[in-house]
Each structure stands twice: as C-alpha cells, then as structure tokens.
Image (cartoon, helix red, strand yellow):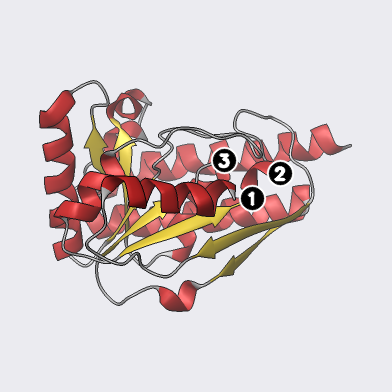
Amino acid sequence: MQPLRSFAFNAVLWGSGALLSLWCVLFGRCLKDGILRTARGWARISLWALRVFCGITVSAQGMELLPEGGCVIAAQHQSALDILVWISLLPRPAFVFKKELRRIPMFGGLLEPGGMIPVDRGGGRKALLDMVEGARQAVTAGRQVVIFPEGTRVAYGERRDLRHGIVALAQSVEAPVLPASTDSGLRWGPRAFGKHPGTVHVTLHPPVAKPLTREKLLALLSELYYG
C-alpha cells in the first residue's frame, strides 16, 4: 500500500509542479514575486499531498528566531522535502542552486527570474564571488538566502565535509546567519521513491556570533547537523 501512496504523492508533486511552471512561463515569468508566490502554492499543495497520502507531517521549531528582512539560512539537506519546507516557511526565500538545474524543462528557466542564486561548483573563485554578490543583492531586497553547506542531499546518519560557500557568505554578507537542522531523511531519503509516515523535525538555531573563523563555523555546523 505504501508504494501506491508514494506514487500518488509523486503524481501530485510533479503534476502540480509542471502545471504551475507552465503557468509562470506563459504569464508570470517577468514577475519575480509572482513566481515566488506560485512556488509557495506548489509547496503547500505538495506538503498537503505528503500528509494525506504518505502520513508525513512537518514540525518546525525556532521560527521565532527568524529576523525581519534579509538573512542567511545554513540548512542541513537530507531530502528533496527540504526545498518544500523552506519555500513554505520563509517569507521570501532565495535558494543558492547549482547551475545544472537550469536544464530542467520549464522549472529550470524560472529559477533566476524568481530571484534564486546560481553557483557554478567548478567555477573557482569567480563563481564564489558571483554567488556572494547574488546573496548580497537578495539580502538587500529583504530575502532569506537558503544555502545547503553539504552541497547535496546526505542520507540520515551519514556525514559529509561541508563546502566553503557558507563561509564566504557568513564573512562577506552583512546579515544574520542562522543554522538549521533536520531529520527529513528518515521519512524521505535522498533518492528514495518510497516515503515513510511520521513527523519531520526542522529546527532553526540562533544566529552564529560574528566574527567567526572558517574552522569554527564549519565545526559549529557539523555539530548541529551530525551531533
């Protein structure tokens, strides 16, 4: 029964995503906030379907720590569910995304018009500077920049060396940096079709104290993510 429930959820996830992306391509591509509102609608539809078909709910703690205006969220990444969660929780999220995602039909072409921040992971120092500049602009516009320091989805219980992009943002962008941890991989694995009922816990932690060295920041995030 659970595989059928997972199939039903995936049908809603991808079907609604395709229809709403097509709507944005046809009517709302030039409207940054319009794309963002559409993305939030997609996230809420998907989270509703996840609860109804798969019995998965989300419990978010620490959201009262979110400052008004721009900030940086250094989020642990275990599942595609994390994208849906942060789109639904944050007022105006701006995700740092790998540029390869631009190739996804319809959806990929909406990322930058929607205010998301591309990064070329093989582009060296210039790519890092471009990402920092994109984050500065997003923060100035009052958006919440979401970066996944692990660089990819990491299965629950596994560890990964953190990438240094978060260090560049923390040291260069004048905004609070808030770590966020999750156990989403328990319910929806990094590349798993099947979903497992239960509650996903997402915790937003207090802003890191600045100035902070690269070593201390990465050690702090590793402790929050992996214990």
Q: Secondary structure at mark 2?
A: helix
Q: Name the residue tied to disc 2.
A: 186
Q: Name the residue tied to disc 1.
A: 183
**Image vertical order of residue 80 relative to residue 180, above or below:** above
Q: Estimate the x, y position of residue 222 in percent, counting from the top left.
A: 48, 46
The type of residue carrying mark 2 is Leu
Q: Is residue 85 left or right of residue 196?
A: left
Residue 167 numbered tag: none
Q: Which of the two labelled residues, at mark 3 and mark 1, occupies the earlier sequence position?
A: 3
Q: Residue at x 40, y 37 (%)?
A: 162
Q: Secondary structure at mark 3?
A: loop
Q: Estimate the x, y position of residue 159 in percent, counting from the top left.
A: 56, 35
Determine the image quadrant of residue 34: bottom left
Q: Secondary structure at mark 1?
A: loop
Tell me, yes or no, whether the two marked residues, 3 and 1, touch with CB atoms within 8 Å.
Answer: yes
**Image vertical order of residue 13 relative to residue 75, above or below:** above
Q: Estimate the x, y position of residue 103 in percent, counting from the top left.
A: 32, 23
Can residue 75 be seen here? The reply is no
Q: Residue at x 61, y 28 (%)?
A: 191
Q: How far apart are the two marked residues, 3 and 1, measured between alpha carbons? A: 7 Å
Q: How far apart are the two marked residues, 2 and 1, measured between alpha carbons? A: 6 Å
Q: Is residue 167 left or right of residue 86?
A: left
Q: Estimate the x, y position of residue 21 in percent, counting from the top left.
A: 39, 41
The type of residue carrying mark 3 is Gln
Q: Nearer the viewer, residue 163 or 12?
A: 163
**Image vertical order of residue 85 relative to residue 194, above or below:** below
Q: Name the residue tied to disc 3.
A: 78
Q: Is residue 149 left or right of residue 189?
A: left
Q: Is residue 211 left or right of residue 44?
A: left
Tell me, yes or no, whether the two marked residues, 2 and 1, touch with CB atoms within 8 Å.
Answer: yes
The type of residue carrying mark 1 is Asp
